[in-house]
Image (cartoon, rainbow, N blue to C red):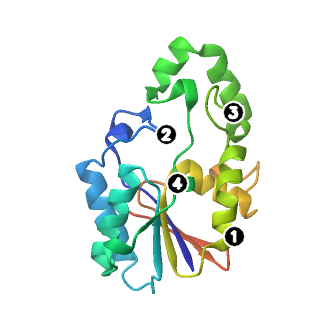
């Protein structure tokens, strides 16, 4: 099994900011969610925990390690697991984006995950940077990362496609369980 964990609620999630590569802290609720994720993983035979270098993911990984008795000193930070770079939209709210970049937000709505953020990335860029890691990750690994990265992993493994990607509802600290790199289920945090 491979467990893809979306980080706990962040301060940016509360203010509805698209924080992407901006390093923001977990909220109090986010820390509580991380405890629940750890409890949900307590019976898993975890051999490795990988994390995005961003605080909201790394702090989630540390809390999960505490709950599962995995040595937090053995968490492996993987830079490829960082969230999508939103470019000109980085750390803005949807309302701010529409006020300043109306044409680009309309393009984003139309193109969905195929959209490349100006001065940022597309999901294709994420897939390129995570593919080697995903190919090599061993069974019984926990991967603590971000919504866009989890979606990109699902696209890369051909679990999701252009038509069903948004059917995978992945909230903060939800755990996407992969069995032989095939979708098995989502363990909901709440």
For label 1, the crowd category at 10 Å Cα-Cα, with few meaning under 14, some 14 to 19 and many 20 or more, is few
Q: Which of marks 2 and 1 is nearer the N terminus?
A: 2
Q: Mark 3 points at which residue?
A: 116
Q: Residue 8: x and y, percent?
A: 37, 55
Where residue 115 sits, quadrant-wise, is top right
User: Which badge, 1 or 3, is on the more N-terminal residue?
Assistant: 3
Measure the C-alpha gap from mark 1 to mark 3: 24 Å
116, above or below 9, in the image: above
Between disc 4 and disc 3, whose residue precedes? 4
The residue singled out by tag 4 in the image is 79
CA separation, marks 4 and 3? 20 Å
Which label number is shown at residue 135? Answer: 1
For this orientation, the residue located farthest to the left is 28
**Label 4 crowd (10 A; few <14 / some 14-19 / many >=20):** some
Q: Residues within 10 Å of mark 2 (few under 14, many from 20)?
A: many
Give left or right: position of 188 versus 110.
Answer: left
Of tags 4 and 2, the one toward the viewer is: 4
Residues at discs 4 and 2 in contact (Cβ within 8 Å): no
Callout 4: SS: helix
Q: Can residue 103 be seen in this view?
A: yes
Assess whether mark 2 and mark 3 are in contact (beta carbons under 8 angstroms).
no
Secondary structure under badge 2? loop
Residue appearing at x 52%, y 76% in the figure: 141
State whether residue 111 is above or below residue 25: above
Residue at the image point whose x is 33% and y is 72% from the top: 73
- Mark 4 or 1 closer to N-term? 4
| Residue carrying label 2 | 20
State how far apart marks 4 and 2 are (Cα): 13 Å
**Labelled pair 4, 3 in contact (Cβ < 8 Å):** no
Residue 58, x across and y down, in percent:
37, 58
55 displayed left or right of 149:
left
| Helix, strand or loop for disc 3 | loop
């Amino acid at each position: 099994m491979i467990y893809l964990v979306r980080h706990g609620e962040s301060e940016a999630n509360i203010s509805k900011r698209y924080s992407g590569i901006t390093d923001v802290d977990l909220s109090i609720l986010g820390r509580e969610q991380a405890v629940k994720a750890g409890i949900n993983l307590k019976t898993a035979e975890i051999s490795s925990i990988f994390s995005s270098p961003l605080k909201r993911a790394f702090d989630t990984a540390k809390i999960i390690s505490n709950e599962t008795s995995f040595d937090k000193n053995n968490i492996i930070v993987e830079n490829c697991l960082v969230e999508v770079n939103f470019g000109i939209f980085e750390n803005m709210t949807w309302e701010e984006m529409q006020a300043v970049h109306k044409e680009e937000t309309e393009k984003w709505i139309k193109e969905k995950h195929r959209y490349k953020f100006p001065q940022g990335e597309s999901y294709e860029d994420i897939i390129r940077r995570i593919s080697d890691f995903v190919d090599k990750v061993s069974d019984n690994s926990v991967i603590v990362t971000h919504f866009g990265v989890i979606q990109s992993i699902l696209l890369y493994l051909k679990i999701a496609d252009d038509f069903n990607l948004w059917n995978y509802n992945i909230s903060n600290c939800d755990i996407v369980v992969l069995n032989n790199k095939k979708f098995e289920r989502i363990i909901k945090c709440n």
